[in-house]
Structure formats: C-alpha cells, structure tokens
Image: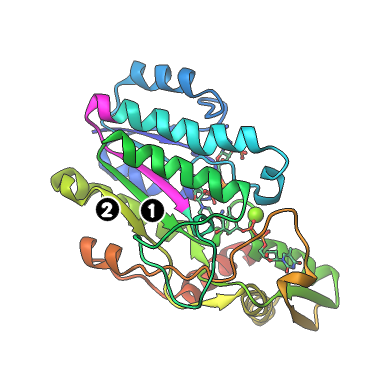
Amino acid sequence: MKVVLLGAKGQVGWELQRALAPLGELLAWDRERADLANPEALAAQLRAVAPQAIVNAAAYTAVDKAESEPELAQRVNAEAPKRLAALAAELGIPLVHYSTDYVFDGSGDQPRDEDATTGPLSVYGASKLAGEQGIRASGCTHLILRTSWVYAARGGNFAKTMLRLAAEREQLRVVNDQIGAPTGAELLADGAAHALRSLLDQPERSGTYHLCASGETSWAAYARFVVEQARAKGQALRCQEVQGIPSSDYPTPARRPLNSRLDCRRFESTFGLRLPHWEQGVRRMLDEVIA
Ligand SMILES: NC(=O)C1=CN([C@@H]2O[C@H](COP(=O)(O)OP(=O)(O)OC[C@H]3O[C@@H](n4cnc5c(N)ncnc54)[C@H](OP(=O)(O)O)[C@@H]3O)[C@@H](O)[C@H]2O)C=CC1
Ligand SMILES: Cc1cn([C@H]2C[C@H](O)[C@@H](COP(=O)(O)OP(=O)(O)O[C@H]3O[C@@H](C)C(=O)[C@@H](O)[C@H]3O)O2)c(=O)[nH]c1=O
Ligand SMILES: [Mg+2]
C-alpha cells in the first residue's frame, strides 16, 4: 500500500514517519515538497503519485499569530483539507486528519464527546473546524482525530518552553484555569496507524474521534510537573516556583478554551485501544530531551 504523509517534519508528522512505515511504501512530504497554502498544486502532486491513503499532519498551528494571518490559516487548515478530502473521495481512498480541542468554546467542566456543539474562540480554532466540516461534507472515508496540548521530543511545544524558561528564571507565571490533557505525538501517530489499519477493513468506522492521553491537568500544574521531573532527572534549573494565575492575567491575541477536556471513549471502544495517562508520555519525552 502506498501512503502519502503531509507535514512530515512536524511533531506528529515526524512520529508518523515511524508509525506508518510498516504499512507499505511511505511518501513522507514536508512543506518544501508539498505546500498546503496552494491546495490545487497539492492535489495535482497527489494525483500524480496515486496514493492508497493520505495522512495529513500539516497545519497552521501558531495560535496567536493566526489572529493576524486569518487568510493563510484558513487556506492551510480549511481549504487544503477540503481539497484533500475531495480528492480522496474521487480516488476512493481514506484520509486521516488531526483537529483540536480549540474547536470548542470551553464552557462547563465536563469532558466533551464528538457530537458536542462546537464554538471556536480563535481564528485557529475556526479554521480547524472549517477543515473538519469540509472533510465530513466530502463523503470520503476519513478519520478526524481531535486532540489537545501536543508535545514531542522533537519540535516546539509548551513543555520545552517551560524547560527553557525554568533554566532562566526564578519564577514562572502560568495559567491555572485552562484544563486539558497533554498528548504525545508518539501516541497520536501510533493511534492513527492502528485506526487506519482498522479503517481499511472496516470503512464504516469512518468518522470523527477524540484522541488524547487520559487524565487531566492545568497548564500550571503541567509546567510544575515538567520542572519537578526535569530536576529529578538532574537538570540544573533556576526556577523555584510556578505561580498559577488566571487567564485574565496572561493576555494573548487569541482566546483559549478553559475546559479542553475531551471524552475519548469512542476512540477506545471502536478501535479496542487504551489511552495511557498523560504523565507517562511526558516522562518519556523528558528522558529523551534531557539525555
Ligand atoms: N500542537 C498542538 O498543540 C496541537 C496540534 N493539533 C493538531 O495536530 C496536528 C499536528 O500538529 P503538530 O505536529 O503539533 O504541529 P507542528 O506545528 O509541530 O507541525 C505542523 C507541520 O505542518 C507544517 N506546515 C505548516 N504550514 C504548512 C504548509 N503551508 N504546507 C505544508 N506544511 C505546512 C509545518 O511546517 P513548518 O515547520 O515548516 O512550519 C510543520 O512541519 C495539526 O493538525 C494540529 O492542528 C491539535 C491539538 C493540539
Ligand atoms: C509561555 C507561557 C504560556 N502560558 C499560557 C498561554 C496558554 O494559555 C497556555 C499554553 O501556551 P501555548 O502557547 O503552548 O498554547 P497554544 O499554542 O495555544 O497551545 C495550543 O496549540 C494548538 C495548536 C492546539 O491545538 C491546542 O490544543 C493547544 O496545544 O499557557 C502561560 O500562562 N505562561 C507562560 O509563560
Ligand atoms: Mg503553540
């Protein structure tokens, strides 16, 4: 089977290069090879290689910057996935795609399932929601995997920012009223590979799924965990305190949801998989980064 992977150098894309390799011939395309800002050219490039599945890990992920670049965010996160889905429908092949907790408004304190009402607060969230909607409307066989708070040893993410700041400063100030689950790129890649295998035999499993590590935390408690673990692993850090603050004390261009809890039971029961606790993957990532 020939699989095209888009966004091959991102956090999740990098892990997908590993996780998808056993499925057959993998064409791993980065931004230089295939630009999602040009959906028509992308479709022509894909058509030329006639893949049997498309996995899209590319996205415009700069949440604050998207507020001032809404057109580019829309092209990459909405128009390109819609074009990919139209091609997948035409070729009769599955499309795997990732989406985000930021499609929701974050009200309440309960985990949301896949059918919960969406209500993005940011340009990024709205562009990702439009991408989902384009895929669902295309009629192609698909997996839309909504996740949250992605980290990896390779690439930029919140945990690595905290490690850097903790080495420089005595005190970190981090929001404690946004709640979610940090999710590793490894888990997202392995989960997608398992689910894609399953989808090839059972196309009726096509649909939208929530896929996050289990458990929940705030960004502040997550930062504290990272600092404590890193110190226990021998990192010299100046940071003495991670001070929890309300989101209102940390103004950003984009608004973020307070409740990012996602109910992942549909993914677990459909594909017969169990999602590990977020702390497990974060520990592994820190081992790798600190080594
Ligand atoms: N990061 C997170 O916290 C979360 C991510 N997600 C979703 O998960 C998926 C994977 O995200 P993640 O791996 O973390 O993101 P990254 O930002 O690590 O990787 C995204 C990749 O997409 C590439 N890319 C950006 N613009 C284009 C373009 N125009 N054409 C081709 N490639 C492009 C980037 O290339 P370059 O490096 O050159 O910019 C990068 O390699 C995305 O769909 C994202 O929306 C969902 C929830 C949380
Ligand atoms: C650096 C920093 C951030 N924060 C806050 C800002 C924000 O509310 C939260 C996390 O910061 P980030 O910049 O990592 O947040 P952000 O880039 O919005 O993270 C999001 O990325 C996109 C792609 C997603 O899809 C989401 O699931 C989520 O992971 O922590 C602090 O409170 N103190 C700090 O020193
Ligand atoms: Mg970010």
Residue 15 shown left or right of residue 250 in the figure: left
Q: Position of residue 223 (x, y in %)?
A: 67, 74
Does 194 appear in magenta?
no
- Which residue corresponds to mark 1? 145
Task: Residue type at mark 1: give it.
Answer: Leu
Q: In this picture, is 98 found above or below 153? A: above
95, 113: nearer the viewer = 113
Q: Nearer the viewer, mark 1 or mark 2?
A: 1
Residue 160 shown left or right of residue 243 in the figure: left
Task: Name the N-terminal-most of marks 1 and 2.
Answer: 1
- Which residue corresponds to mark 2? 195
Q: Position of residue 173 (x, y in %)?
A: 78, 74
Identify the residue at horizontal 60%, vertical 56% (top origin). Answer: 121
Identify the residue at horizontal 25%, vertical 31% (top origin). Answer: 52
Label count reads 2
Chain part drawn in magenta? 89-99
Q: In this picture, is 200 found above or below 234? A: above
